[in-house]
């Protein structure tokens, strides 16, 4: 009568006989059930189920991961270039870079701005002019102070 309803009679019999996974001999690791993966559900959660033997007890470990897919924007020219067929020594190789033929450069490349030298020279010139003006102003101030001191002391100014 169970066969007409679509039930699996083998698993029902094993369950009725008391052969659950927690009732097995815990000292033999070969008796642990196989690990399995529960596929991603509607909310994007994937579950990994593993079984362990810790301190003489069987433990079921369930790890849940949120699966997130991100779309990356790529310029059209790069997308087109990625579609090119491989050629030469890599003709039969799978997609992606090949260790034998692709070398990633680790050299530091410094790019100089052509107008930077002119800007630096102008900054140096402005700094020099600023210093000269400050020096001239200080000398003029010191001269005025000297004249006032001489007037106060009663001698003739220079």
Image: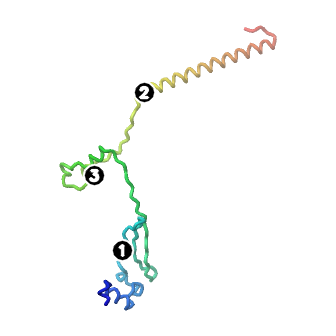
Q: Quadrant of the C terminus?
A: top right
Q: In the rendered view, how is the structure colored?
A: rainbow
Can you tell which mark lies on residue 93? none
Local packing at callout 1 (Cα closer than 10 Å; few below 14, some 14-19, many 20+) is few
How far apart in space, not on screen, are marks 2 and 3 (Cα)?
Answer: 38 Å
Q: Is residue 18 left or right of residue 76?
A: right
The residue nearer to you, when weighing 125 against 67, is 67
Q: Quadrant of the N terminus?
A: bottom left
The residue nearer to you, when weighing 25 against 10, is 10
How far apart in space, not on screen, are marks 1 and 2 (Cα)?
Answer: 63 Å
Can you tell which mark lies on residue 36? 1
Q: Residue at x 40, y 28 (%)?
A: 114
Q: Residue at x 75, y 9 (%)?
A: 157
Identify whether 128 is placed above or below 23.
above
Q: Earlier in the sequence, mark 2 or mark 3?
A: 3
Can you tell which mark lies on residue 115? 2
Nearer the observer, disc 1 or disc 2? Answer: 1
Can you tell which mark lies on residue 97? 3
Nearer the observer, disc 3 or disc 1? Answer: 1
Q: Residue 9 sits in which quadrant?
A: bottom left
Q: Position of residue 92 (x, y in %)?
A: 19, 55
Q: Label 1: state its secondary structure.
A: strand
Q: Earlier in the sequence, mark 3 or mark 1?
A: 1
The residue nearer to you, when weighing 7 against 67, is 7
């Amino acid at each position: 009568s169970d066969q007409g309803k679509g039930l699996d009679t083998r698993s029902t019999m094993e369950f009725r006989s008391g052969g659950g996974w927690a009732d097995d001999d815990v000292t033999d690791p070969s008796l642990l059930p196989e690990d399995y993966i529960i596929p991603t559900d509607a909310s994007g959660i994937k579950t990994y189920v593993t079984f362990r033997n810790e301190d003489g007890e069987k433990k079921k470990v369930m790890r849940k991961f949120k699966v997130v897919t991100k779309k990356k924007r790529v310029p059209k020219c790069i997308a087109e270039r990625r579609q090119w067929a491989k050629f030469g020594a890599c003709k039969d190789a799978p997609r992606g870079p090949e260790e034998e033929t692709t070398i990633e450069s680790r050299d530091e490349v410094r790019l100089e701005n052509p107008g930077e030298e002119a800007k630096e020279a102008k900054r140096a010139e402005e700094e020099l002019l600023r210093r000269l003006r400050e020096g001239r102003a200080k000398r003029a101030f010191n001269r005025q102070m000297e004249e006032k001191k001489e007037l106060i002391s009663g001698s003739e100014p220079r």
